[in-house]
Image: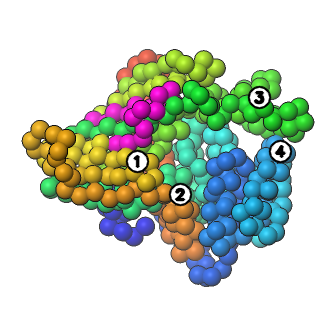
């Protein structure tokens, strides 16, 4: 986190940032293991927990509102080599009382993020909270206040912020050789038509359904009858999440703002709809346009056609940076003062690596060194605010103008 790109970010991202305060806790010994608990034991929670275990930490407790998920993640951790079975809890608040617990991973549906994080801060635990940080802009403000009051190390799961390949991109874009950045285009296109990974699995039988505490799953969401579709595909329902715009925008808008050296847009407009997955509430195709004052950013995301894949292009007045953003993809820098042609060779190119292990390790190091991690709470709030504003535009059908200093919509 002490790389030049990280320091530059903290200097340049002042438009709506709050002052970062280093956590006031004692730095831990380099070889001292952390006792970590997992709240929310789906696929992402499993991945993060295993990364902590691989990094030499203790996984001591897990919590979930569904018994079958507790059983599943316990088996997954054992297969990964975890010797001691973590203590299971059906209530995350009980997990926070686990003896000797140092930190938690929060990988629940989005609408639980705020309550889980505030409870963790109240209990004095460090936290890794999955993206998107919040379910609303106001929630994010409350979460920042709680984290800074508790003085704990909190990493938001915008893992691209721990990728050195993106830090290198930022140095290129901010250089004189690149010229002025005028447009950023980011996209994420996947094809879930043949197989929707969040469809209700055939194994979700009556016994598993009975083991779900539906009332606890709903939390602060409006009361509604148990629905297996909403339970599995919660990302696509407004009660629980913000759809593709917040789920994917948490990554793509992160590199827009970080690499572009900005913290907040001046305005945003978004359009889209539900064109294929008719059971979704949130759009399955959505496009947004953000005016950052110095440049415009466009973001297109849909899960119906995967032709374009995942990527980003940064357009300067002298050079262009084209990024295949999937792990293993290639980032290429071109001189484009003249018209591009297919035979033009890149000035430089480098690979994209898997950022998740790097992001988890950055969090663990930050706890032991008593420092802010690469994606602190303020940064997670800035990024997801841009996505929330786009959803507000989509749902109201209006262009949204944003006062970043006062953190409020104008008009």
Which residue is label 4 attached to? 68
* Quadrant location, the N terminus: bottom left
* Numbered disc 2: secondary structure: helix
* Numbered disc 3: secondary structure: helix
Where 203 falls versus 53 (above or below)? above
Mark nearer the viewer, 2 or 1: 1
Distance from label 1 to label 3 (Cα)? Answer: 33 Å
Which residue is label 1 attached to? 325
Q: Residue 121's x, y, as percent?
A: 66, 57
- The residue at the point 67 percent across, 71 percent down is 57
Residue 394 part of the magenta-drawn span: no
Crowd band around label 1 with a 10 angstrom C-alpha radius: few (<14), some (14–19), many (20+): many
Distance from label 2 to label 1 (Cα)? Answer: 14 Å
- The residue at the point 68 percent across, 30 percent down is 199
Extent of the magenta region: 296-312
* Numbered disc 4: secondary structure: helix
* Quadrant location, the C terminus: top left
Q: Are marks 2 and 4 in contact (CB under 8 Å)?
A: no
Which residue is label 3 attached to? 228
State whether residue 256 appears in this view. no
Which residue is label 2 attached to? 356
């Amino acid at each position: 986190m002490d790389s030049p790109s990280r320091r530059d970010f903290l200097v340049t991202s002042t438009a709506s940032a709050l002052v970062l305060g280093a956590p006031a806790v004692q730095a831990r010994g380099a070889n001292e293991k952390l006792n970590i608990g997992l709240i929310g034991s789906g696929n992402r929670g499993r991945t993060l927990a295993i990364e902590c275990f691989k990094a030499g930490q203790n996984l001591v407790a897990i919590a979930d509102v569904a018994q079958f998920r507790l059983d599943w993640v316990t088996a997954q951790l054992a297969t990964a080599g975890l010797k001691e079975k973590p203590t299971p809890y059906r209530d995350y608040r009980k997990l926070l009382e686990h003896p000797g617990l140092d930190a938690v991973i929060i990988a629940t549906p989005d609408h639980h993020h705020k309550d889980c994080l505030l409870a963790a801060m109240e209990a004095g635990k460090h936290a890794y909270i999955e993206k998107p940080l919040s379910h609303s802009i106001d929630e994010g403000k409350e979460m920042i206040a709680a984290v800074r009051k508790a003085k704990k190390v909190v990493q938001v799961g915008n893992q691209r912020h721990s990728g050195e390949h993106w830090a290198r991109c930022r140095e290129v874009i901010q250089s004189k050789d690149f010229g002025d950045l005028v447009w950023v285009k980011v996209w994420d296109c996947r094809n879930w038509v043949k197989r929707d990974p969040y469809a209700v699995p055939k194994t979700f039988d009556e016994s598993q359904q009975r083991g779900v505490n539906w009332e606890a799953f709903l939390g602060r969401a409006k009361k509604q009858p148990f629905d297996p579709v909403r339970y599995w595909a919660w990302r696509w329902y407004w009660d629980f999440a913000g759809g593709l715009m917040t789920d994917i925008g948490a990554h793509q808008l992160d590199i827009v703002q970080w690499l572009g050296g900005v913290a907040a847009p001046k305005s945003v407009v978004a359009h889209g709809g539900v064109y294929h997955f008719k059971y979704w509430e949130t759009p399955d195709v959505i496009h947004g346009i953000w005016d950052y004052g110095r440049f415009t950013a466009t973001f297109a995301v849909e899960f119906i056609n995967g032709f374009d894949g995942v990527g980003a292009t940064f357009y300067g007045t002298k050079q262009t940076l084209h990024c295949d953003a999937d792990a293993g993809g290639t980032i290429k820098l071109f001189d484009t003062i003249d018209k591009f042609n297919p035979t033009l060779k890149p000035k430089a190119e480098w690979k994209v690596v898997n950022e998740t292990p790097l992001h988890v390790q950055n969090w663990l190091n930050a706890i032991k060194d008593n420092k802010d991690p690469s994606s602190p709470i303020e940064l997670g709030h800035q990024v997801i605010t841009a996505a929330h504003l786009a959803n507000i535009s989509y749902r109201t059908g209006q262009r949204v103008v944003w006062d970043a200093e006062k953190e409020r919509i104008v008009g």
